Amino acid sequence: MGRARGGADRGRYRVSPGHPALAARMRILILTQYYPPETGAPQNRLSDLARRLKRRGHKVTVLTAMPNYPRGRVFEGYGGRARLEETIEGIRVVRTWVYAREGAGFSFARRLLSYLSFCASSFAFGWSKTGPLDVVIVESPPLFLGLSGWLISRLRRAAMVMNVSDLWPRSAVEMGLLHDRRLVSLATALEEFLYRRSSLITGQARGILDDIRLRFPDKPVTLITNGVELESYAPAPTGSRVREQLSLGRRFVVGYAGLHGIAQGLDVLIEAARLIAAGGDADVCFLLVGDGPDKARLQGRAGSAGLRNVLFLPPVPHREMPEVFAAFDVAVVPLKRLDVFKGVLPSKLFEAMAAGRPVIASVDGEVREIVEAANGGLYVEPERPDLMAAAITRLYRNPAERQALGANAREYVIRHFDREKIAESFERSLIETLGQRR
């Protein structure tokens, strides 16, 4: 990193006066397949990071796909183009073509084709529009996008940072999506190739970093957790507007907000709803907000069982999520029973806690550790609807405990998972990485 003498610029970076964390101006590219106007955890997290880095004086460009997630249908106004440029909340966004797999269900072949198509188009149509760069941040998964990131970083003589939010191909193998040994070997070789050529690897949970450190002990790795935009949750939202719109009245609302996919294992909620309805607790209802490849099947299962206590809602804009979480009496964070999920931290966990809602964590590992450290909810063994129903019933019948757990959750997330502090930590890691390269 260039040194600043007497406040003057030296070399490529300019040390900003008055900034507490050596805020050197960097030219940053965020390469991701997922970005707003799509909704979802990576979209919200990366757009938030881009805005915060820009506010801290850096030039940020996003190279992403034509929006199509999660339905696999390109959004209106974006179709029929190889490349498109726009500005979203002050961030320059370059979009390139992607194979949108509408109606593909769980077809791994089509999902793979979608990944590979954007990997190719982001390099073929996008790299020349990025301008000079200092850092290329690659969001993984999809792992294949790292190839485009590596080529762009080579051509721009920039540092490549792999930001790993899910261990791939390991998670695909454990979920039963990837069976072919040749493909597993090829994906594992690609993973090793990309990690070894990264100047820095960041991960969103300790379990992810522990796995990477074990296999690549010579690579610098940094924990950059998920978090919450505290500005949107201050003061604490009430949820009254959402409850009124949905005519929920005084009903006890068990809420889930997020992707309806294979990994989430939402069948546990459908079965828990059946058990609670059979037990006669008519005031308990389940509200599932979001979309995804498994939603239609879940709706069909709830309908076939005649469950009137389960309500499905479409995704809502990110700005409305604080009120949605606040409309819940308790928030559920479930995942399937897989070892790889012990090292994940879904963003919905922090949003529910920021809204002051107790969390029923049906995920072992780091999610459970946070909920128990905060004393902000209950842990339930994954894929156990009987235990899920028992935990829901307990909180339903104990409003004082529910209120205390929610207050603890909010206090804990404010102290430990503020996205402004997370962005500052990420910025510092990038500056140190560039300094070491020079």
Image (cartoon, rainbow, N blue to C red):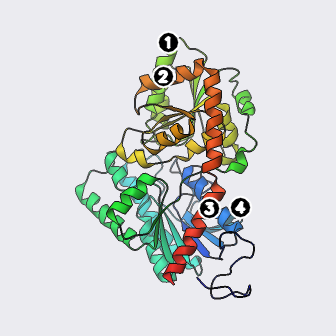
Q: Nearer the viewer, residue 273 or 303?
A: 273
Q: Amino acid at mark 1?
A: Gly
Q: Residue 421, can we see it?
A: yes
Q: Position of residue 365 (x, y in %)?
A: 42, 43
Residue at image position (64%, 82%) is: 13
Task: Report the side of 354 relative to 298 (left or right).
Answer: right
Residue indicated by mark 1: 279
Q: Counting residues from the N terminus, which is met first, the one under dot 1 or under dot 4?
A: 4
Q: Nearer the viewer, mark 1 or mark 4?
A: 1
Distance in Å between CA atoms under marks 2 and 3: 38 Å
Q: Are marks 1 and 2 in contact (CB under 8 Å)?
A: yes
Q: Amino acid at mark 2?
A: Ala
Q: Counting residues from the N terminus, which is met first, the one under dot 1 or under dot 2?
A: 1
Residue indicated by mark 3: 423
Graded by Cα atoms within 10 Å as few (under 14), some (14 to 19) or many (20 or more), the crowding at tag 1 reads few
Q: Residue 47, can we see it?
A: no
Residue 96 lies, with reference to residue 14, above or below; the image says above
Local SS, label 3: helix
Residue indicated by mark 2: 389
Distance in Å between CA atoms under marks 1 and 4: 49 Å
Dividing the picture into quarters, in which one does residue 197 lie?
bottom left
Q: Position of residue 118 (x, y in %)?
A: 47, 64
